[in-house]
Image (cartoon, rainbow, N blue to C red):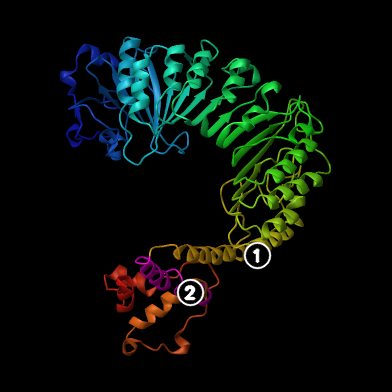
Amino acid sequence: MAQPDGKCHSLLELIPVDQLSEEQKAFRPSNETRMPLYRMRRDPTFWGEIFHDGAFFDHDLAIWRENRTLLCIVNHDCWRPSGFREQNISFTLYKDYEAGRYDGVDLEIYGKTDATIVETATFFWSLKQGECEEGRLRMPSLPTIQPEQLARIFDANPDMHFEFEEGTWSAEQSVILATRSFPLNVKLVWVSFEDNGTAFVNALETRQQYSFGMFSMTFCDAEHVPLSRENVQRFLKLNLAFEKLEIGMLESECAFLPFSVKSNALVYEIELTSLEASDFESLDIIAEDLFLKFNLGMTFEWDEHLVCFFHRLAELGHFERLRISVNEGYLGCIIHDDTSHVAEALITAITANHKLKCLDLSDSYRCLEWFAHFQGIFKAMEDHKGLREFHLKKLVPQIYNDDIDCDESDGSESEPAAYEWLRQLLSRNRKIVVYNSSGKRCSNGEAIDTIYLLNDILNGSTDLVKESTSLRPLLVATALVESTSRKFLHSALLMSNHADMLCELMQVVNIEEVTVVPEEAIEPEQTSITPVESEDSKRRRSGSPPPPATKKAART
């Protein structure tokens, strides 16, 4: 692959091979054309100065720093220069904090000493992400990083999502983490505290900023919590507010404490082995956005736990987003023949939570087969005013055949019924969309797709009403000549919310310019969702101006 000219980048300058020092050559792999070495013309102030030209980084390259370290940007196969295998750290930068694990830029820092590596890491981790961007930085926990360096990293990007992996935090480092004067977004993955978190919790108790932001601790099980039991209890009873709290399984003495934390969103895994179903009857849950992962442990009668839990959700009635996961325990997947009582309790929770916008059951199929209860669940959703999304793993149950090496359902009996229930739901609740585990809309083809399309038009028309007075005429006129062109039903749905705009459009139309189209030239209404190219689309493609009525409506 031909390498780009270093002069093409405003910040990076290619170092000619004949000018490389012996120290620089030691970092280079055997294939010199694959790993060109650059130096910076000046220090950048934000990441965009380095990555503004994506095409420039379609190959591996390295950047030499004056402190004798290398920043390597790796796009393909990983490499390790001989002699420096242990003296390196790796991290990943994501432009979007919700990006997938493999959607970021992988970088590595090489050097001769821990101090110089940390110095380079601090410089790059302190670069500004960019205005109006909430990126994510995934990096290792470094025991040698100084408190002032860690503070510099946090302070440079208050909106950044920091994800620290493994390693042990010193007391001094944990104090910096706890005492920022602004909300932080921090995820600790398999980390530990050298003092079991005492300094961290002590500092949180004196924190001046009431809101922490987002805090997540990921660990294997209750025996590997990075905080001691006492510090877990102290942490969960702090007078702090979280935008989001995510925490793994805790010992039974602390199992219900996360629910009472002041957090807008809670992600929590709870093991049922030592808990009674009745324990859920008086549970106090603060979060409006709840993702609860039930780990069955060694519990056989876990269905009663879920029934009590759903009844409690119905009593509280303040939830906006609800995601339930049921994971097999130590004894495997314990399945009950009849789970209708669980479904009935769920339906009670759905109908009682009027603000519920999203319900996600896609990760609860290991021990619960919801298909037999979809008719009742869908029925409960028909009149729900708030519900917008329902996520499930699959609409039609999986049918396995020992003679066929595949995982496809034959759908011979269950499929027609399932899609008839779905059709009724979508026809009676125009606001809701049902998704499968792949994030796609559940559908059996054109029949269901057509309903989705009509609902999209209706909901889009309703949303247009909220637009400013100056924009709405233009948007309505554009929708008429593009999205709903030549489709009477679609146009009728659009105008059902914008009759006033139709009157305004008619007032600016010059009747003398109107061309009467013969009846035989009118195409029948298209029922397929295949988009029809409107005259306005053709006009824009050919460069012709739009009709006067549309332009006048835009100026109204």
Q: Which residue is mark 2?
A: 495
Q: Could you tell whether 217 is left or right of 277 in the image?
A: left
In the depicted structure, whether residue 505 falls above or below residue 118 = below
Task: Work out how far the residue at label 2 is from the one at label 1, CA to CA, in angstroms.
Answer: 20 Å
Name the residue at 52% across, 10% down. 195
Query: x, y percentage for residue 345?
Result: 76, 46
**Of residues 260 and 513, the one drawn nearer to the viewer in this rendering:** 260
Q: Which residue is mark 1?
A: 428
Name the residue at 23% across, 35% down. 4
| 9 in the magenta segment | no
Query: x, y percentage for residue 41?
Result: 17, 27
Q: Could you tell whether 501 is left or right of 271 in the image?
A: left
**Of residues 54 and 552, the one drawn nearer to the viewer in this rendering:** 552
Name the element at disc 2: helix
Q: Quadrant of residue 232?
A: top right
In the depicted structure, whether residue 355 falls above or below residue 507 = above
Q: Which residues are magenta?
A: 469-490
| Residue type indicated by callout 2 | Met
Query: x, y percentage for residue 295?
Result: 70, 30
| Residue type indicated by callout 1 | Arg
Q: Are marks 2 and 1 in contact (CB under 8 Å)?
A: no
Name the residue at 40% across, 22% down. 90
